[in-house]
Image: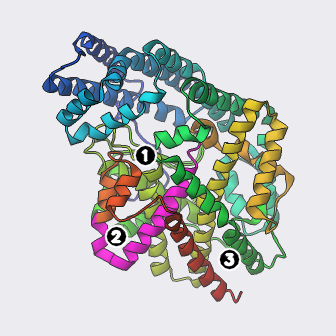
Amino acid sequence: MDTTPTPERWSLEDLFGGPQSPEFKKALEELDRRAAKLQELRDELKPGLPAERFLQIVRQVEELSDLMHRVYAAAGLWFYEDTQNPEAQALLARVRQKSAEIENQTLFFELWFKDLPDEEAERLIQAAGERYRYWLEQMRAWKPYTLSEGEEKIVNLKNTTGRSALDTLYDTITSRYQFTLEVDGETKTLTRGELMVYARDSRPEVREAAFRELYRVYAGDAPVLAQIYQNIVSDWKNEYLEVRGFKSAIAVRNKMNDLPDAVVETLLAVSRQNAPLFQRYFRLKARVLGMERLRRYDIYAPVTEAEKRYDYAEARRMVDEAFAAFDPRFAELAARVFERGHVDAEVRQGKSGGAFCWTPAPGTVPWVLLNYQGRPDDVSTMAHELGHAVHGMLAGEHPVFTFHAPMPLAETASTFAEMLLVDYLLENEPDAGVRRQVLFDQMDGNYATILRQAYFALFEIETHKMIPAGATADELKAAYRRNLEEQFAGAVEVSDEFDWEWISIPHIYGTPFYVYAYAFGQLLVLALYKRYREEGEAFKPRLFRILEAGGSAAPAELLAREGFDITTADFWQGGFDVIAELLEKLEAESGA
């Protein structure tokens, strides 16, 4: 692997030569041409349509959708590299509008297929073959929630200036935030990513100051950010519950994920039951840090005095070696992302915070956004996002409709990749203090990915009931306080500024109820990784089959093929049992 010494900025050349190129403009025109050509076939959609002709039409729909995904990615990636760029903002808005128009122009195919008699639909599904089977079956599964063509067109257009526009507004507002922190007598102006480095500082007063500054800035816009959230939730209810007929707000996401409601209810119930496990961990960590009780500021505090730093080249080498030790194929796929110049890792004002991986369409090498600052957590994030990239490339043989893994499985490769890095560090790190910190980081990560996300989902369930009933921003804030009190149950002291934490969580704005997928994925991977350690080489084909499947089968069905029954509470408890074993090891080593 080529090792760039400093965090780089990505290139968008592989998407039509970039969003400002003549080729991109031609792609926009090609979208219109293909949509018009597809519309010409409308009159052919009649009972008895020959199977061969149906397959040809399906391929035309696929080609149009594939092109739309690539165009959208070019505009979206350009926006996220600088959310304050007015040209990028305008282009993303234009492309979102174009996407809605294209969807409306081609809506007739989906509505026609949903409306077919079962026998006729089954004939065409069989003729389309395995490549399109799951996509077509899922289309039929949405029939009870589908509106008339005219109504669907209105909803599509509404969303471009409704939920999508509100989410973009939230991103634009929060990405411009600057934070001020005094450290060692020097006043620093920081991005959120830079500020959060100090939330993991070894000095308690610095951690406290970082969190206070974070929520001071967000709270300054609390009335606006809360109102954005209230309108997103109201829009969600109006469309999905009032118009489409879903019974609950979270049932919409469950349907999108092709998960039975009961599976998600069980996942959240078992997570809630295991809150005392993490409360026990927080009490242990307080003793290790020499504190009577942890404060919320101290949740992610290091247990060693000085946190080790890794330069960018070293981080890339470590991740590459960790992946290669598992399987050369894993490492080779991750290396492609760097080779194509698809990583944006430098920290800069206006750039989207956090990290993500975006795989536009089958056969593309994904783009990865990082904000690399040399912390161990940044190395883990690099492994995590590259795991997503590997997943996207492994599933690249599927059509654009089904190559993306559904949300519950979307975190499988990424979380597995993080665990590969942990094993690598435990085996290769010579410093015993660093190895100990790695184990504590694992517990911190399990809390952040499982329990914290489960409680975010529980908060969303509550707010999606409260807001339609007229809840104010202060009432939502009070609900979040109750959520925190149940989550920590006195094991952690939570100061008042954390009551506004929820307005700083982008997922609850942009993708309601996404968060439970993190808990799902982490608990699943704990089970997978346990099998890997038990079975070694024999396990690898099972993991690759899960990843290669992408979104071509229901999660429960796909995992059942590999011996995992996600419908039982015992399955989810098994993941928590792995965490309990790690906690017992830390307690024993800490003399607790």
* Mark 3 in CB contact with mark 1 (< 8 angstroms): no
- Classed neighbour count for the residue bearing mark 2: other residues with Cα under 10 Å, few (<14), some (14–19), many (≥20): some
Q: Main secondary structure of the magenta part?
A: helix
Q: Which residues are magenta?
A: 512-541
Q: Nearer the viewer, residue 55 or 557?
A: 557
Mark number for residue 509? none
Mark number for residue 406? 1
Disc nearer the start of the sequence (1/2): 2
- Indicate how the structure is coloured in the image: rainbow
- Kindly identify the residue that appears in the image at 49 percent across and 71 percent down: 422
- Kindly identify the residue that appears in the image at 80 percent across and 34 percent down: 471
Q: Is residue 265 above or below residue 32?
A: below
Query: Is residue 328 rendered to the left or right of residue 520?
Result: left
Determine the CA span between mark 3 and mark 1: 38 Å
Q: Secondary structure at mark 1?
A: loop
Is 529 magenta? The answer is yes
Q: Position of residue 210 (x, y in %)?
A: 77, 55
Q: Secondary structure at mark 2?
A: helix
- Observer-side mark, 3 or 1, equals 1
Determine the CA span between mark 3 and mark 2: 29 Å
Is any part of residue 372 visible from this angle? no
Mark number for residue 326? 2
